[in-house]
Amino acid sequence: MDGDRVEIDGGIMEGGGQILRVSTALSCLLGLPLRVRRIRAGRSQPGLRPQHLSGLAIIRDLCEGRLEGGEIGSTEITFTPGKIKGGTHTADTKTAGSVCLLMQVAMPCVLFAASPSELHLKGGTNAEMAPQIDYTVMVFKPIVEKFNFTFNCDIKKRGYYPQGGGEVVVQMSPVKELSPINLTERGIVTKIYGRAFVAGALPIKLAKDMSAAAVRCIRKEIRDLYINIQPVREPDDQAFGTGSGIIVVAETSTGCLLAGSSLGKRGKNSDKVGIEAAEILLRNLKHGGTVDDSLQDQAKFTVTKLEEEDPGKDTYIIECQGMGMINPNL
């Protein structure tokens, strides 16, 4: 703390944008002024990129806060939050910066706003180094809604690297508080499904090749389950630019959802894209946990071994401590 301003070193851990996103959202939620130094110090091009700046701007607008140092390339910002109002807000990266990462920084804040929010998020919907919008809708949404809130995510237009140009509209009402969830039983895999997509100048054959390669790869490990990966060509009026990719989701008898995904790029064989997604899914199924590595990534967990009477059986309790946030604006 510097006086009453929380000081954060943006270069810790992998030194990327995640520290900035989490600390700004927490500053907004807790009403604590913030200074972040050494922003993205671990990256080849340190400082704020358009995506990070638009994320900061939407948080500032949501709570009528004050932001200093908000320029491209800036390695230090100070942020003074106000009351979280909600309402309609737009964040536009004007690049292929991920709309899903914009959602990640804004969602915790709008959940504890004074009124419902509508967020128009513009940029890349299927971008490297970020969750694909398909993952957000097919896995993240149904799992986080177990915490007793709902949100609507309308994909208006998909956008790909390098231009972006995608848009999603997220609508969400605030809650008084979140309910904890208990997700300890994996159950058995009951279905595997997904979508392989192409857009722009790419032929549907590539989507079919990605799908077939993913199915072949999964079949080696899981033989007796119907696998439904739909090849899709995105309509031209609902996609900007040229892109391709695949997501494969496994659903279990206890309602767990685990996924693997991959994006196509120039020079990358479409079979390889499909196999990559399938291998990530299979790796997530092998570890026996109830969430995949992309979902687990967002929090700190403790692991405690239980003393069992049966010495041949190891049992662990894995817990995540919430902050017990109660909405002061409702």
Image (tube, helix red, strand yellow):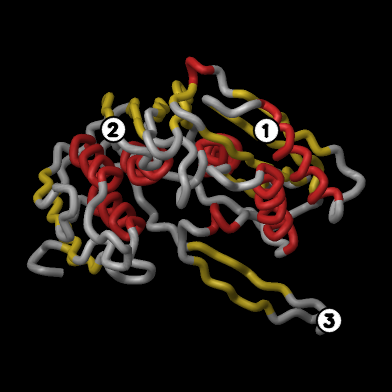
Q: Residue at x 51, y 41 (%)?
A: 132
In the rendered structure, the answer to whether residue 308 lies left or right of residue 71 reads right
Single out the mark in the foreground, 3 or 2: 2
Assess whether mark 2 and mark 3 are in contact (beta carbons under 8 angstroms).
no
Type of amino acid under label 2: Asp
Query: In the rendering, which numbered label is found on residue 207?
Result: 1
Which sits in the foreground, 287 or 4? Answer: 287
Query: In the rendering, which numbered label is found on residue 312?
Result: 3
Q: Residue at x 41, y 28 (%)?
A: 166
Q: Residue at x 22, y 57 (%)?
A: 47
Type of amino acid under label 3: Gly
Which sits in the foreground, 212 or 329? Answer: 212
Is the C terminus in the top left, top right, bottom left or bottom right quadrant?
top left
Is the N terminus in the top left, top right, bottom left or bottom right quadrant?
bottom left
First in sequence, mark 3 or 2: give its number: 2
Q: Residues within 10 Å of mark 1 (few under 14, many from 20)?
A: many
Element type at mark 1: helix
Q: CA distance from mark 1 to mark 3?
A: 47 Å
Residue 213 place in picture, x, y as percent? 76, 44
Q: CA distance from mark 1 to mark 2?
A: 29 Å
Which sits in the foreground, 36 or 40? Answer: 40
Q: CA distance from mark 3 to mark 2?
A: 55 Å
In the rendered structure, the answer to whether residue 44 lies left or right of residue 266 reads left
Q: Which residue is mark 2?
A: 92
